[in-house]
Amino acid sequence: GAGVSQSPSNKVTEKGKDVELRCDPISGHTALYWYRQSLGQGLEFLIYFQGNSAPDKSGLPSDRFSAERTGGSVSTLTIQRTQQEDSAVYLCASSLEAQGAYLISGNTIYFGEGSWLTVV
Amino acid sequence: KQEVTQIPAALSVPEGENLVLNCSFTDSAIYNLQWFRQDPGKGLTSLLLIQSSQREQTSGRLNASLDKSSGRSTLYIAASQPGDSATYLCAVMMGAQKLVFGQGTRLTINP
């Protein structure tokens, strides 16, 4: 697609329910990122995918959070047993990526418009 | 641990003024630095990317500089317009493709 697409754009869920957030990156982008922006806070790194593998999961806040990516394209971020502190905007981004572990420092990262999650 | 700080947190200026937004970071071992714009209720739009080996980048009325040794970057906006009103975020790229963001500067341009 022309840009990074995220769905749903808005989600209100009851505490304790599971939610799935979807990200469709720009076609051809092999790197995919999830960030979280809580009200009044900066952006917080969650996880990064290179292809279907996740070299860095260090930002996932708890074991209730998981993410997967299939076919080197669409990614799903799943939050189990949601808590009120999970309320935030979840932003997905993608970029071109070099072969293997080598970084291309000039790659611009493109963000989607986010999924606004409210846990009540 | 990398920390990115943006000053000021908010800025309000009349239309037409030139202005400078500041960003500082604590760890100079970065791959690149990006400036983003975020409009209310929207995602982030990349404005400029400066590679670690570069000193500045320009795009239209925007100019970003990078002094990696001192851990500083500035975003210069010339002849500001009301449409420039947004939150401007600075982010540095660390290893493993991790962006570390500042808290942003909320800019308001008054007509």
Image (tube, coloured by chain):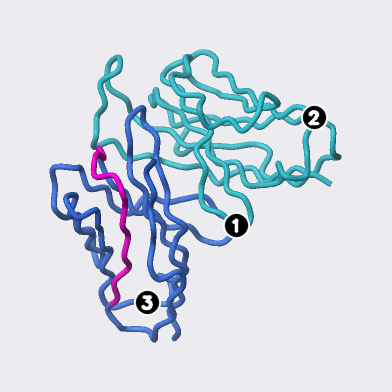
Chain colours: A cyan, B blue
Q: Are marks 1 and 3 in contact (CB under 8 Å)?
A: no
B26 within the magenta span: yes
Q: Which residue is mark 1?
A: B41
**Do the residues at pointers 1 and 2 share their chain?**
no
Residue B15 is drawn in which quadrant? bottom left
Q: Which residue is mark 3?
A: B81
Closer to the chain start, of discs 1 and 3, is 1
Tell me the magenta residue range. Answer: B19-31
Q: What is the three-letter code of the residue carrying label 2?
A: Arg
Q: Which residue is mark 2?
A: A81
A5 within the magenta span: no
Can you tell which mark lies on residue B26? none
Residue A47 screen position, x and y as percent: 51, 29
Q: What is the three-letter code of the residue carrying label 1?
A: Gly
Nearer to the camera, A83 or A35: A83
Please tell me whether mark 1 or mark 2 is closer to you in this view: 2
Nearer to the camera, A49 or B72: B72
Q: Residues within 10 Å of mark 1 (few under 14, many from 20)?
A: few
- Kindly report the distance in space between the C-alpha atoms of the residues bearing marks 3 and 2: 45 Å
